Image: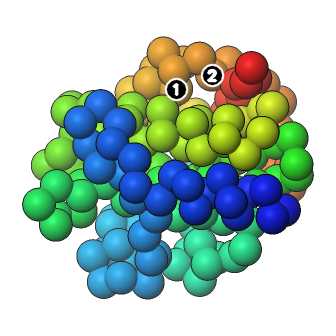
């Protein structure tokens, strides 16, 4: 990550989006680890193992990854990360909303926040990988509503029948 990215990330440590406070968080926190594991269990229940690309807490500590959480009154409601692929391209990673908090705009607030972080970093393109099955219809619909369109594989991904790729060009 370039020093400009670090400065931009530091200026966006706490940002209220759609009424939710989204802030940089530590993926090693116990409640965050539990929600990441719930995300992994869900993904593995509907996809083959090779199709699951959930960040592991240690991978979320990589210098190119910034990990965020949504909390209300200290309760963890959602998570998401942005991974800098290169100076012009970033990836949204491991977005997940707690089951009890779904349907309240938390996932969309996280997407909007991650896109704002990418914009502040000067990124020109933001992409994501999502499951192709029925279990991911709502997520893909949310991404499309946020301006993401289908694209081919990017980074180290390869196309399979189990995943789709989406991208959004910024400014």
**How far apart are labels 2 and 1 at the CA level?**
5 Å
Q: Residues within 10 Å of mark 1 (few under 14, many from 20)?
A: many
**Spot occupied by residue 1 in the image (x, y as percentages of width and height):** 81, 64
**Spot occupied by residue 104 in the image (x, y as percentages of width and height):** 20, 33
Report whether residue 155 is seen: yes
Q: Quadrant of the C terminus?
A: top right
**Spot occupied by residue 151 in the image (x, y as percentages of width and height):** 78, 25
Residue plotted at (63% across, 22% down) = 148
Residue for badge 2: 148
What secondary structure is found at the residue carrying circle 1? helix
Q: Earlier in the sequence, mark 2 or mark 1?
A: 1
**Spot occupied by residue 130 in the image (x, y as percentages of width and height):** 59, 40
What secondary structure is found at the residue carrying circle 2? loop
Q: Nearer the viewer, residue 44 or 91?
A: 91
Left or right: residue 20 compared with residue 152: left
Q: Residues within 10 Å of mark 2 (few under 14, many from 20)?
A: some
Q: Is residue 1 above or below residue 84?
A: below
Report whether residue 42 is seen: no
Q: Quadrant of residue 125?
A: top right
Marks 2,1: beta carbons within 8 A: yes
Left or right: residue 75 compared with residue 153: left
Q: Disc count in the image?
A: 2
Left or right: residue 137 compared with residue 29: right
Left or right: residue 63 compared with residue 39: right
Residue for badge 1: 143
Q: Quadrant of residue 50?
A: bottom right
Residue plotted at (23% across, 36% down) = 19
Residue plotted at (67% across, 35% down) = 119
Q: Quadrant of residue 59?
A: bottom right
């Amino acid at each position: 990550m370039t020093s400009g990215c670090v400065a931009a990330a530091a200026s966006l440590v706490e940002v209220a989006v759609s009424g939710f406070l989204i802030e940089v968080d530590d993926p090693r926190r116990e409640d965050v680890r539990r929600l990441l594991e719930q995300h992994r269990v869900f993904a593995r229940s509907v996809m083959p193992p090779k199709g699951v690309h959930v960040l592991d807490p240690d991978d979320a500590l990589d210098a190119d990854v910034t990990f965020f959480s949504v909390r209300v009154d200290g309760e963890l409601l959602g998570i998401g990360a942005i991974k800098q692929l290169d100076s012009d391209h970033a990836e949204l990673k491991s977005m997940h909303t707690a089951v009890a908090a779904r349907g309240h705009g938390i996932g969309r607030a996280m997407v909007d926040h991650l896109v704002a972080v990418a914009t502040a970093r000067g990124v020109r393109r933001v992409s994501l990988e999502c499951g192709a099955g029925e279990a991911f219809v709502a997520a893909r619909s949310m991404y499309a509503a946020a301006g993401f369109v289908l694209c081919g594989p990017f980074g180290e991904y390869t196309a399979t029948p189990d995943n789709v790729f989406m991208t959004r060009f910024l400014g």
